[in-house]
Amino acid sequence: MSDTPLLKVENLKTQFFTEAGTVRAVDGVSFTVERGEIVGLVGESGAGKSVAVRSILRLIDSPGHIVGGEITFDGKTVVGFEDEPGTDGEPTRREEMLTNTEMRSQIRGSEIALIFQDPMESLNPVFTVGGQLRELIELNRGLSKQAARDRAIEILREVGIPQPAERFDDYPHQFSGGMRQRVLIAMALGCEPKLIVADEPTTALDVTVEGQILDLVYDLQDKYDASFLWVTHDMGIVAEICDRVNVMYLGEVVERASVDDLFYNPQHPYTEALLNSIPRPDQSTEDLQPLEGAMPEPINPPSGCRFHDRCPEAREVCQRTHPDLRTVTEAGQYAACLKHDAFEAAYETSRPLTDESPAAGGDRRE
Amino acid sequence: MSLPRYVARRLGQSVFTLLGVVTITFLLVNAAPGDPVRIFIGPSADASAIAAMRAQFGLDQPIHIRYIKYLMNVVQGDLGQSINYRVPVTQKILERLPATLLLVASSFTFAIITAVPIGVLSAQRRNQLSDHVFRIFGLIGVSTPSFWIGLLLIIILTYHLGLLPATGLVMPWAPPSAVDHATTRLDVLYQSGIHLIMPTLTLGTLQMAAIMRIERSSMLEVLNQEYVSLARAFGVSERTILRKHAFRNAQLPVLTVIGLNLTTALGGSVLTETVFSINGIGTLIITGVNARDYPLVLGTTLFYASLFVIGVLITDILYAYLDPRISYGDES
């Protein structure tokens, strides 16, 4: 069992059925998280990162629905559908797929815990910080009230809350943003789950606090031997803490690589564009290459490769052919881009789309 | 700031509210056409009797003198003599108070214990059939005048079905000898109960509908908060989320509506008491207005205003109890 990944997401599809049409927020995403690993899920706002991780906990609210794919976690089927849809055209659940009650009692909190994004809104203002933490530990670790309280104080100390016993009975409004984020981390750690999903937990914090939080997570990951799925749009964080990275664009994973390969040898033009848009101390701002345009709406994605209308390397074939994720290097790096030989898409002979565009990045890759 | 100091300060501030109420009411009753003395003595009285009575109640003095005198008396706790009843206004109010308090308390109790669970249920089952039914019921409830509900109840339950008595109230603590159809204490309680049902529904339906609507929307808003998502993501059951994580937060707007609805309830008591011939403060106000009994109108209005001020104060104190972010008088 230990050679299977802790979390395996395969061809996950989550769609929102709105009046304006079907939004394919997550459209065939696959990735894995091995035990003890920190995996990044990177992309711009709206790429479908949050929807993907909430699908893992089956926390998608109507009008959203998980419509296909398979998620297995530690031998349990979190999401699993029959290949053939049922007689009503709806996807049919496989028998081994956990029920909603099983999800609640066996997975959420106790096995997979989510670190929430917004420290200001994620704590209940009318209950004490300690009380909220204690409740979750009590529920997910099956401890007595007193034991859960002791554990809560201990974990508050570990995440760096000074005088945790005294602050236990304080209310969230008496904590700063950084302190509240530590409390949210304490909630996830205190439940001792096998997998912690961090949904951009440092986005709302200033940079110094962000640095402290990242150090903290790094230390605690060692101690608790938890695996992490880290959602972010910040390449800096990826470089700092991740082992492997999945880059998402418009509901799809477009590149998967180890963190070193990704930074030194990106295989997808989107990844490259993200890296080029990071300010670096050895470059002036003129050297920055911000990504042109905005990500299209997932309600009506572009034909062919979804990135082709923003891609500096797009060719005609990219408008027609939709690339899946394939191995493109000997090191086992994955990318979904037709420029690689693995796709045999006649990319080289196809006419470039961006001849007239001054932003073509050809001269930058050498 | 401690609670007693907060209460003292708020009560001090409410003096100005009450002064405003007295001033406006004083000007309004004096501006209204009609003369209390003529109404009391009748059209055929001679001029000297009228002049004597005017002098007795100080009505021969100019309005600003009467206003100042009235304020001086009110400060000393004296609401004056009723022209119509020839007894102190305070005595009349205390005599009528129990019936009105019983009616208002019973209506609010009915409204809160029905509206809060229904509102929560409605929010939990948003857009399902039961939610739609409750919402339509709530809409009808807030849009129907209370006296019309009262009349309808009398027509159906008393006139057609003969189930419930349509007039008067029986105090539950009244001695059995003073109550019709009663020989034991239990009979008195029974009579009190059946007399209360229709007035309670009449006065309480509006409150119930208003509380239900705010409870529903407030719960819905709280259920969309990130901390509810967090509870859900950590495996807390929907039941616990509803009862614990969402309920308390959702009660702040509900509390506001209940506090503010004291005004509609007190105003509604005037109509309800009239429809059911209940001898409460509401009918006392009507009598006072009809007789142009200036001291009586002023006294009852001031009394209702004081009740309202106290009600709002209690609401504000409960706020701080429900929400730790609110503390007494931080702004000072």
Image: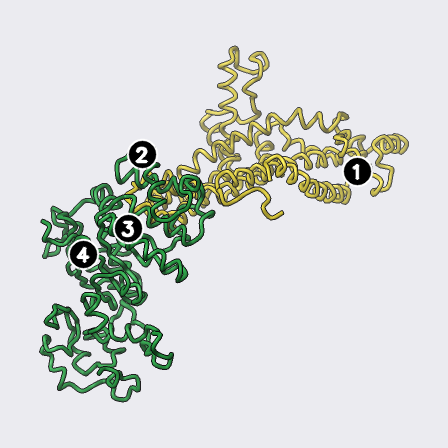
Chain colours: A green, B yellow
Between circles 2 and 3, the one closer to the viewer is 3
The residue located at (60%, 40%) in the rendering is B1
Q: Horizontal placement of B168 versus A303: left or right? A: right
State how far apart marks 3 and 1 are (Cα): 85 Å
Q: Amino acid at mark 4?
A: Val
Which residue is the site of mark 4? A33
Which residue is the site of mark 2? A147
The chain letter for the residue carrying disc 2 is: A
State how far apart marks 4 and 1 are (Cα): 90 Å
Mark 4 on the same chain as mark 3: yes
State how far apart marks 2 and 3 are (Cα): 21 Å
SS label for mark 1: loop
Label 1 packing within 10 angstroms: few (<14), some (14-19), many (20+)? some
Mark 4 on the same chain as mark 2: yes
Between circles 4 and 1, the one closer to the viewer is 4
Which residue is the site of mark 3? A220
Between circles 3 and 1, the one closer to the viewer is 3
Residue A229 position, x and y percent, is: 24, 56
Residue A205 position, x and y percent, is: 40, 59
Pick the residue in front: B203 or B240. Answer: B240
B34 vs A354: above or below? above
- Report the quarter where the C terminus of chain A lies: bottom left
SS label for mark 4: strand
Q: Amino acid at mark 3?
A: Leu
B330 vs A230: above or below? above
Label 3 packing within 10 angstroms: few (<14), some (14-19), many (20+)? some
Residue A86 position, x and y percent, is: 12, 53
The chain letter for the residue carrying disc 1 is: B
Q: Which mark is residue B35?
A: 1
Q: Amino acid at mark 1?
A: Asp
Mark 3 on the same chain as mark 1: no
